[in-house]
C-alpha cells in the first residue's frame, strides 16, 4: 500500500523551467481584495500549487526537515486551523494594498482560513504567516517600576499581581521581490542574481523562475507586543508610544552590560504600558536581527577586537572595529522595518523610543509622522555601555544631550578583557 505520510523520493530540480501548472494560483501583490490578491502558497504538500520561492517557518525550515528525516514528522501533515484565529480584529488597512508600504510581510497571512475560505475548500494548503494571541508579562524591571510608583496598578493594563496584559503578534517574513528591489533601489534581476549567489545557490528559482515574485526567506521573524487596544494603533488621534527593537540576546535575555539594549527595551515596555493607562496605546516591535543583522559570532569577535585594541575600548573607535571585522558597521536595512508598523495601520507615532537615525529616517520616509523622539534616560545606561552610547551620539544618533568631541570620546572607555 502507498504510504501517504511520505513524499515521493523522486526529486524535481527547481532548475527546470517548465514547472508551470494549472493549479498554481497567481499573486497580484497590492490588490485590495484578498481573493483578487491571491494566497501565498508555499507549503510542500502539493508542489504543483506552490506560487512562491522558499517555504514556511523561516530558519526553522531546517529543523522541520530534520524531524521529517528522522521519521518523527509526517511530511504531508496539514495544520488543523480550527480555533487558531486572532482574538482581536486587525485590519484590513489601506496600507495593506499599498505596494510602497507593504513588501516584507503578507498582511493576508493573518487568518488565511477566513480570507481564503473557498481556496481551502478547493484543497489548497495555505499556511498562516502571522498569528495573534494574548498574554500576561511578568518582568523584574516592570515590577520595580510598579513598586516605585511609576506604573500604577489599574486592574486593566497592570493587574493587582503585577501582570501586564498584552496582545502579541508573530510575523514571519514574506518578501515581494519587485518591492524589495524598489526599496533598495536596485534592479530586480540584479537582486535575484545576488540572492542566488550569496545563499550558495540555495534557491535556483531566483534565476529559473522570474515569474515567481514572492520569497519566504529563511530568516528570523518579528514580534509585536501591544499594550491597550490594538485597533487604536490605526487611529492617529490616539496617543501612540512605540519602540522598534532589534534583537540583542546577550543583553535582552542574559543582562550583559556592554550595551543598552535590555534597559532601553524595558523602559519602552514601561512607557508603552503607561501610555495605555492614560488612554493611549503602546507597541514594541521586536526584530530578530541579532548583532546589527551580522549575527552573534561576528558580534562577539567585535567585542574582543574592541577590548584588545591599543588604547583600550573607546567610543572614538566603536564603529570602526565592527567594520574591520564584519565589512560593514551595520547590515540591518531598516528600510523594511516600517512594514510591520503599516500592518497595524499606524500613520502617526507620538513617542518614538529610538535614538537610531536609520530607524527614524526609514519610518518617516515610509509616510509615518513622528512627533517626539525619546532617548534612554542616562540613569539606565550600564557603566560598560557608555562606550556604545557616546559613540552612537557622536555618530548622529538622536539624543537630547550634546555630542562629545573626539578627545572626549577617547576618554569614554569600557572594561578591558580578562585574560
Ligand atoms: Zn545589545
Image (cartoon, rainbow, N blue to C red):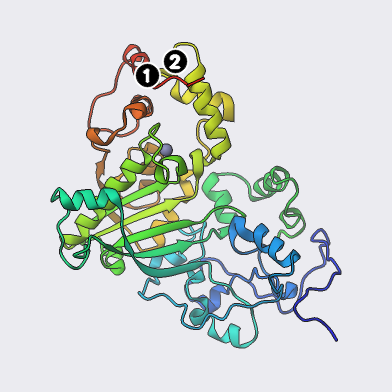
Looking at the picture, how far across and down is residue 364, in whole percent? 35, 47
Q: Residue at x 77, y 81 (%)?
A: 4
The image quadrant of residue 379 is top left
N-terminal-most mark, 2 or 1: 2
Tell me the CA gap for discs 2 and 1: 7 Å
Question: On the rendered structure, is 335 left or right of 156?
Answer: right
Q: Residues within 10 Å of mark 1 (few under 14, many from 20)?
A: many
| Vertical side of 129 occupied by 295: above or below | above
List x then y, in percent, for residue 45.
70, 75
**Residue to which mark 2 is pinned:** 312
Where residue 52 sits, quadrant-wise, is bottom right
Left or right, 97 with reference to 124: left
- Report the residue marked by disc 1: 413
Q: Position of residue 369 (x, y in %)?
A: 29, 51
Seen at 37% across and 24% down, the residue is 387
Locate residue 224: give its quadrant.
Answer: bottom left
Amino acid at each position: 500500500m502507498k504510504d501517504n505520510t511520505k513524499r515521493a523520493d523522486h526529486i524535481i530540480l527547481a532548475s527546470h523551467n517548465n514547472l508551470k501548472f494549472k493549479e498554481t494560483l497567481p499573486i497580484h501583490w497590492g490588490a485590495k481584495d484578498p481573493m483578487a490578491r491571491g494566497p501565498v502558497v508555499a507549503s510542500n504538500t502539493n508542489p504543483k500549487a506552490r506560487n512562491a520561492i522558499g517555504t514556511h517557518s523561516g530558519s526553522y525550515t531546517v529543523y522541520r526537515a530534520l524531524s521529517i528525516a528522522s521519521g518523527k514528522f509526517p511530511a504531508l501533515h496539514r495544520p488543523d486551523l480550527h480555533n487558531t484565529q486572532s482574538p482581536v480584529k486587525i485590519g484590513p488597512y489601506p496600507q495593506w494594498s499599498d505596494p510602497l508600504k507593504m513588501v516584507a510581510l503578507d498582511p493576508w497571512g493573518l487568518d488565511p482560513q477566513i480570507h481564503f475560505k473557498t481556496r481551502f475548500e478547493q484543497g489548497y494548503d495555505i499556511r498562516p504567516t502571522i498569528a495573534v494571541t494574548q498574554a500576561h508579562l511578568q518582568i523584574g524591571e516592570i515590577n520595580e517600576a510598579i513598586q516605585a510608583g511609576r506604573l500604577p496598578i489599574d486592574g486593566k493594563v497592570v493587574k493587582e499581581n503585577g501582570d501586564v496584559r498584552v496582545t502579541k503578534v508573530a510575523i514571519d517574513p514574506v518578501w515581494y521581490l519587485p518591492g524589495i528591489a524598489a526599496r533598495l533601489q536596485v534592479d530586480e534581476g540584479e537582486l535575484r542574481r545576488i540572492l542566488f549567489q550569496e545563499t550558495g545557490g540555495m534557491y535556483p528559482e531566483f534565476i529559473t523562475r522570474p515569474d515567481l515574485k514572492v520569497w519566504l526567506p529563511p530568516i528570523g521573524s518579528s514580534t509585536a507586543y501591544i499594550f491597550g487596544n490594538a485597533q487604536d494603533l490605526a487611529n492617529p488621534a490616539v496617543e501612540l508610544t512605540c519602540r522598534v527593537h532589534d534583537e540583542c540576546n546577550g543583553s535582552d535575555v542574559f543582562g550583559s552590560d556592554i550595551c543598552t539594549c535590555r534597559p532601553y527595551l524595558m523602559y519602552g515596555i514601561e512607557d508603552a504600558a503607561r501610555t495605555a493607562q492614560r488612554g493611549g496605546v503602546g507597541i514594541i516591535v521586536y526584530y530578530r536581527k541579532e548583532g546589527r543583522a551580522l549575527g552573534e559570532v561576528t558580534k562577539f569577535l567585535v567585542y574582543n577586537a574592541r577590548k584588545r585594541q591599543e588604547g583600550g575600548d573607546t567610543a572614538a573607535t566603536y564603529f570602526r572595529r565592527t567594520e574591520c571585522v564584519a565589512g560593514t558597521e551595520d547590515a540591518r536595512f531598516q528600510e523594511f522595518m516600517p512594514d510591520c508598523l503599516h500592518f497595524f495601520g499606524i500613520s502617526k507615532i507620538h513617542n518614538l523610543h529610538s535614538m537610531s537615525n536609520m530607524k527614524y529616517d526609514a519610518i518617516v520616509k515610509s509616510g509615518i509622522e513622528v512627533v517626539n523622539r525619546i532617548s534612554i534616560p542616562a540613569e539606565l545606561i550600564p557603566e560598560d555601555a557608555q562606550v556604545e552610547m557616546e559613540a552612537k551620539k557622536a555618530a548622529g544618533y538622536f539624543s537630547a544631550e550634546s555630542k562629545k568631541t573626539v578627545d572626549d570620546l577617547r576618554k569614554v572607555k569600557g572594561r578591558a578583557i580578562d585574560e
